[in-house]
Image: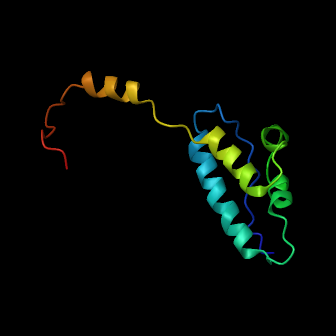
Amino acid sequence: MDKALRPARLEVLPNSSDAPKIYNHWKKTFEYYLAALPQTNLNKLHVLTNFVAPDIFDIISEDATYDAAIATLDGNYIKAPNVIYARHLLATRKQQPGESFILI
């Protein structure tokens, strides 16, 4: 297997500030890696287990399938935006000098 396609180990914890960005990049590179592997008798859950740190493995250790493990990781890493905070930012925002009123 080409080392250029091999993803790095996912080691960032879900409560980190950069976790969603790092996880999305890792997930995409991991999917590309899986696609490059021979698909006959491929256990994706076993491959996934090799590419996560022990702390991350604790999150997915109860899952029996690859799809369930990815859904668990997605649920832990991809957070819905805080709508109340976004509305607060919009309501308290001040127009900067030289900033257009029209949104593009």
Occupied quadrant, residue 57: top right
Q: Is residue 38 left or right of residue 98?
A: right
Q: Image height check: is 15 above or below 8?
A: above
Rendered location of residue 28, percent (x, y):
62, 60
Q: Is residue 79 above or below residue 46?
A: above
Residue 4 seen in the current view: no
Quadrant hosting residue 15: top right
User: Where is residue 87 shown, x and y percent of the image?
Assistant: 32, 27
Q: How is the image coloured?
A: rainbow
- In which quadrant is the N terminus drawn? bottom right
85 with respect to 47 (left or right): left
Q: Residue at x 87, y 74 (%)?
A: 41
Where's residue 42, x and y in %? 84, 70
From the viewer's side, name the closer residue of 97 and 62.
Answer: 62
Numbered label tally: 0
Q: Position of residue 98 (x, y in %)?
A: 13, 37
Looking at the image, residue 2 lies above or below residue 8: below
